[in-house]
Amino acid sequence: MNRKQRRAANKAQARGIPRVRRSEWADSKLREAVSNHQAGGLDEAERLYSEILSQDPNHAVVLNFLGVLKSQEGEARQATELIGKAIALQPNYVEAHYNLGIALQEQGRADDAVAAYHKALKLKPDYTMAHNNLGNALKDQGRLEEAVVAYHRALESEPNLGRAHYNLGIALKEQGKLEDAVTAFYQALELKSDFAGAHNNLGSVCQERGQLEDALNHFRSALADLMQQSAFKSVRPKGFMNVDIAHTALLALKSALEVEHVPFFLAYGTLLGIVRDGDLLPHDKDMDVGLPWDVSREALVRALTEKHGFSRFGRHTPENDAWLINLVHRETGISIDLFFFKPDGDALLSGFHHLPVPLLWRFGHFTTRPLEFLGHTWQVPDPPERFFQEIYGPDWRTPDPYFDTVVSGHNRIPGTLDVAMCFAFGRLCERMDRGEWEKAAGYCRQILAQYTDPFIDKLNQWLKQRIQTENAQA
């Protein structure tokens, strides 16, 4: 069984493909298709599912299974259509509602995904994985208290579900409940000692506490586990935002801020994509907006969350809020970061709170000017080219999907290298976990350009070999 087959088999098992008990003519074909699907033979499974549907286009079970297969292949929209047909034929098909939730989540349709999981749970209240995935969808929307409840309900029915302990830890960490988060991560590690994600998040907790060396050690443990597990990984669909959906979220924020009379301007990667490429960056994961320092954080958050369809995520403390507020647009699940720019003599500071020192970038003072985008007028730093030169360096016009501002921003203030390296290690873990070898190698290069670390040098050489091997096999 090759990597693709192993990955598909694991996902198929996790998606709860049941044994087939049908008596019509398609019974043997369907059993053969499911067997191939569970074994990772996606091409043969798809051929068999399609053959059945050519004779019986209203076969709800086959429509659901083919939708699962398409979701596994990254075809979330087609998966949604197929599984939706299955539900139309069998409205009480609980697994189909669950699988629909997954496909909707992959498209960034957070509200619809939550509704699908709730329908599955109404039909089957003890559906463990539906509770777990509902928690994930709620967490993505910034609804952390509800997410925690969902994870606890998953653990009530299956206490040894390491993934639920891990997800619970993430939600607790985002709530700022670090001790409870640490407990959850260690519970996940007790169930699976090489759980790289738990090590990664323990590193993140140490980082938030300012325990930078402990953080780096946890990150190294996570990376070592990921190197061992990598033989069974292949590249997954990237978790980048859907640009068309992101347009909706950005326009919603613009409307909300204008209603509330809050001035703002486009910043960082969002501004870079629009000015340089004419649209949002396709490899980005969120959007960035700048605001004046004197904006009332409390009033802004209250208005956006209570009146305009946004939720908060991340740490909610006065120290964090001073520099950065993380929002998610509930309708789309798209994240938007609000950066507050602080006057500092003839400069402006932007970044975020961190222990033992905040991680900040220094810009020359600027005013704003109008820019047309999506048929609307936006404010941007004037001139934007100087803004880009300061943060991205002289080569900002050359697209670099591996550049990370937090790690490599040219105007980062002195004394913050260790903090930046902790972020780099954490994000390197995420890329390794996703099997995104090129992106992981990009983080290795950024780290080694600023920081001497034999382990990262070794990992970088390993990644080069891995990438060369996969390219040769392609």
Image (cartoon, rainbow, N blue to C red):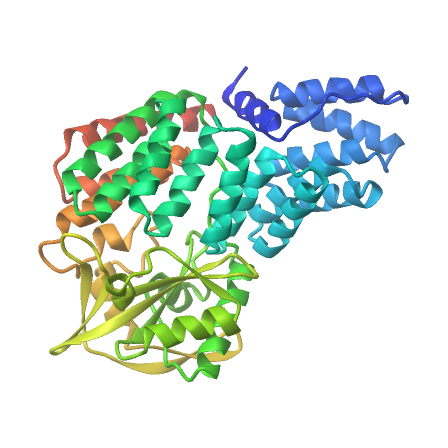
Q: Between residue 326 and residue 62, name the one nearer to us.
A: 326
> Looking at this rendering, what residue extends furthest in the front direction?
156
Please tell me how many numbered marks the rendered image carries. 0
Rendered residue at 55%/53% (across/down): 108
Quadrant that contains the N terminus: top right
Q: Between residue 169 and residue 40, name the one nearer to us.
A: 169
> Looking at this rendering, what residue extends furthest in the bottom direction?
261
- Residue 350 lies left or right of residue 146; in this view the side is left
- Residue 451 lies left or right of residue 464; in this view the side is left
Rendered residue at 61%/27% (across/down): 12
Rendered residue at 15%/33% (across/down): 453
Where residue 244 appears, as percent x and y from the top left, is 55, 61
**The quarter of the displayed image where residue 93 is located:** top right
**The quarter of the displayed image where residue 449 is located:** top left
Where residue 364 appears, as percent x and y from the top left, is 17, 74
Can residue 442 be seen by looking at this rendering? no
Where residue 149 appears, as percent x and y from the top left, is 50, 46
